[in-house]
Image: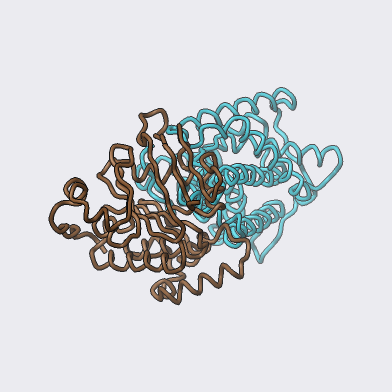
Chain colours: A brown, B cyan
Amino acid sequence: MSLLEVRDLVAGYGSGPSILKGVNLTVESGQVQCIIGPNGAGKSTLLKTIVGLLTPREGKIIFKGQEIQRLRPDQVLQEGICLVPQERALFPNMTVRENLRMGGYMLRDRRLMEQRIEAIFDRFPMLRERSHQKAGTLSGGQQQMLTMGRTLVLKPAVVMLDEPSLGLAPIIVERIFDIVRLFAESGLTVILVEQNARKGLEFSDWGCVLDLGKTMFDGPADSILSDSRIQELYLGKSKPTPAPETQA
Amino acid sequence: MSELIQILLLGLALGGVFALMASGLTLVFGVMRIVNLAHPIFIIMAAFISYWAFTLYQIDPLLTIPVNMVVMFFVGIAVYKTVLARGVDKPGYVTITVLITFAVALTLDGLLGYFFSNNQRVASPAYATEAIFIGSFFIPKAQFYAAMVSLGLIGLVWAFLKFTRVGYAIRATTQNRSAAQLLGVNVGQISTFTFGLGIALAGASGALMSFLFSFFPAKHWEWIAILMSLIVLGGMGSLLGAVVGAFLLAVVSAYVSSFFGPTWSPITFYLALFLILLIRPEGLFGEKQEAL
C-alpha cells in the first residue's frame, strides 16, 4: 500500500472553474517525489487540496489507507502531512525561536519540542545567533531556511514543499536543496514542486508531470529525465538556463 | 508647572482605563480583522451588571470584574457564533463586519434603552469621592484603582499572549492566518476564543466605567470614536499600540480639557483620528494594511 494516493482529484477555488481535472498521484514512503509542469498546471492547487485548504469537488485523497479529503488543515497535519507554501509562511513579529515553537504547535510534549529546536540550532547556527531576532528582519534566504527548518520540529511523515527555491539567489538555492536532502535523510517523505524541473528531478526518486490539471506522466525520476518527449515539452532541450539573479 | 504635572497625573490615570477598553477592540481586530463597532455597547452592558450589583446589593464594582468577564466572554462567543462566524474567509468580510457589528450595536443599544431607560447612571462606592495625595498632587481614588486594575489586566493578557500555547496561536493567527493554519492552529476555534476574550475585556472595562463615567445605553456612540482613535493611533491589532495610544490621547485630552474647557476634550480624539489617517494610517506600531 502506498503512503499517499490521490485518485481522480478535481478541485478549484470558490465557484471558479476546476483547476485540477482528474489528478492521480502515488507517493511511496521515504521517497522524494518531484512534481513538475508549466505555470498554471495546478501544482500548488494540488498541494493545497491535499493539505485541506481546498475541498475537492471529486476524487479521493488516501493517506495510510484512510480518506482524508474532508479534513481541515489542522487535522491533515495531525495525520502527518505538512505543507511549506510558496508564499512566506513566517510570523514576522515573532522571534526566530517563537517561530520554531509554532512549528511544534501540534507537539504536546514541550520538552521534546525544545530538544528538537536545539537540534535545529545545532544544524543551522545562523538561526541560533538570531534566535531572539524577529523573523521579519531576516533576509529572504534566511527566512526560507527558517520556514523549512521549522518543519523539523514536528517531523511529520510527509513534507510538501511548494517551490522552495523561488526568488532566491543560486547560492542560497544550494542551501535550500541541502535542507531537502536533510529531510530525506531524516526519513521524511518529500513531495517537491520545483520550477527548476531538471534540478528537482535530479534530486528525486520519482517524478510526476502535471499539465492542464491532469497527470501527464508518472514514473521514476531518471526515466522522466531521459524521456525525449518530456524533455522537449517540459524540461527544455538543452541544459537549463541559470535562475535569474534575485535577492538573497 | 505643578498644575501641568497635576494634569499629567490625571491624564495618565485616565489613559490606563482607556487602554483596557481599547485592548479588547484591538485584539479582535488583530486576529479576525473585525472592526467591532459594538465593543462600547458591550462595555456599557457590563457597566449595567456592576451598577445593579452595587445599587441592589452594595457589591463593590471592582469585585464584579471576574463575574463580568465570565458573563461577557460567553455573550461574546454567542454573538460571534450567531452573526459573525460565517464567511470569515470570504472576500469583503472586513467591510461586512463593520455593518454587522454596527447592527449589533444598534440592537443592544435599543434593548438596553428599552429595559433600563436612557437615564444617566453612575455607581458611587465610597472611594468615588476620595483622593490619594502625593505631596501636593492628587489622584481621585476611583481613577487610581481603575488604572491599576486596568494595567494589571493588560499585563495578564500580555503574559497570556506571550507565554501560553493558546497565546502563541493567537499571535500567529494575527500575523499570518494561513501559515498558522498550516502549522495546525484551528483558526476557527482561535477566532471564537479571541472574540470572547475581547468582549471579556470589555466586561472588565464596564465594571470600571460604572463608577468612573456616567453612562447610559446611547452613550456608546461617543465611545466608538474615542476607542477607534486610540487603536488607530497605536496601530490596529497591536496591544502595545493600544496602550501607548490610550496614554498619549488621554494625556492630551486632559490638557485640552484644562486649557480650553471640558467641552473641547472630545475633539482631541476626533482630530487625532483624522490626522493619523492622513499622516500615518498604519499607526505607531501597526503593520501596513493591504487595501480592502
Q: Residue at x 65, y 24 (%)?
A: B110
> Looking at the image, can residue B58 be seen?
yes
Of residues B258 and B250, the one nearer the viewer is: B250
- In the displayed orientation, state which residue is furthest to the right: B57
Q: Place residue A41 in its image quadrant.
A: top left
> Looking at the image, can residue B252 be seen?
no
| Spot occupied by residue A118 in the image (x, y as percentages of width and height) | 51, 74
Q: Quadrant of the C terminus of chain B?
A: top left
Q: Residue at x 65, y 37 (%)?
A: B42
| Spot occupied by residue A212 in the image (x, y as percentages of width and height) | 29, 37
| Spot occupied by residue A33 in the image (x, y as percentages of width and height) | 37, 55
Using the image, determine if residue B14 lies above or below residue A169: above
Q: How many marks?
A: 0
Of residues B254 and B159, the one nearer the viewer is: B159
Q: Is A143 placed left or right of B34 in the picture? A: left
Of residues A62 and B48, the one nearer the viewer is: A62
| Spot occupied by residue B235 in the image (x, y as percentages of width and height) | 45, 49
Of residues B151 and A122, the one nearer the viewer is: A122
Q: Residue at x 46, y 51 (%)?
A: B179
- In the displayed orientation, state which residue is furthest to the left: A238
Q: Residue at x 24, y 61 (%)?
A: A247
